[in-house]
Image (cartoon, coloured by chain):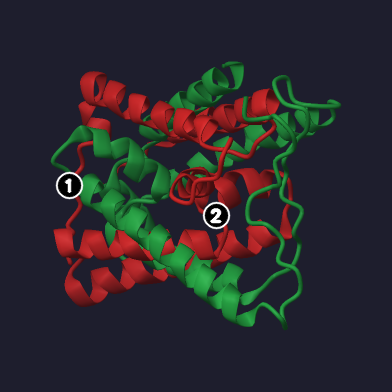
Amino acid sequence: MGDFTPVSALLGGALIGLAASAMLLFNGRIAGISSVFGGLLKPRAGDIGWRSAFIGGLFLAGALLAMFAPSTIASSPDRSMAATLAAGLIVGFGVRMGNGCTSGHGVCGLSRFSRRSLVATVTFMATGFITASLIQVFAGGAL
Amino acid sequence: MKTLLAAAFSGLLFGVGLGVSGMTQADKVIGFLDLTDAWDPSLALVMLGAILVHLFAFRKITGRPSPLFAERFGIPTRTDIDGRLVGGAALFGVGWALGGYCPGPGLVSSMAGGSNALVFVAGLSGGMLLFHLYDEASSGAAAPSEPTPTPIEPRHVGPTGR
């Protein structure tokens, strides 16, 4: 923990950028994960296949990582199951309310100079920094 | 079929990128968001790398008359800054730091089994469904006074799903 990994971060980021570009080039769609996944939980006819395929691709990536590079996804943060469940609920509600997350606003939106995405990204980075820092200061980094 | 394969390929590449980048390591994410304790800035470079690639690709691709497998591009067109945008993003940041996962890495990491990620994804789905219920209830009540809401998703046109 705390290891500076600039090369893998830039390389992984570039792959994410390529993936978003592939989605746009082939299907004309924005690869915003919360919107793609959220749309499956509010299904509309004719709109389910490509969403499922994209999320299936994410799961396949997870399975491959679990097989060939398990350390990349098997981290255990200092968070209880209760805190993690609450985190999921808050993230799920928040990303649907704000129309996007790190992928849709942070990568796709900023890349096309969207004002909404800039405001959203600055906001979630700020509350993320504040929350994690407060948890460190007042709870020793574990919840 | 082509659109499905393309979407699956994009999802696979996206997920591998998340794994390579370190975004799927919840403890690393928390170490990035926590500014007080031996700050690890690596994950800022993930967004930088992704934007550097996608910024140029976006201009090149949207210069085309249409995508390869669809009739039209579905790019969001809203420009208004409203309370939902800011409030939703603020909530998202809190939850991200609380659990260490944003939606993509949560979904990818849930394949590891026995990890926090599975619990996160259950919560994520529940939170999304809760918002859908809240949205339906509030839009039903406020319908007469509100301007026509812009769709959350870019409106998809014609038979793009097939």
Amino acid on which the number 2 mark rests in the picture? Gly
Residue A130 visible in the picture: yes
Identify the image quadrant of residue A85: bottom left
Nearer-N-terminus badge (2/1): 1
**Residue B151, percent across and down?**
68, 57
Residue B38 shows in the view: no
In the rendered structure, the answer to whether residue B113 lies left or right of residue B97 reads left
Tag 1: amino acid: Ser
Is residue B64 found left or right of A63 in the rendered image?
right
Q: Which residue is mark 1?
A: A76
Q: Name the secondary structure under disc 2.
A: loop
Which residue is rendered at x = 62% and y = 24% of the image?
B162
Q: Please give left or right for residue B52 compared with residue A65 in the image.
A: right
Identify the mark at residue A100; answer none if there is no mark.
Answer: 2
The label shown at residue B74 is none
Q: Colour of chain B?
A: green
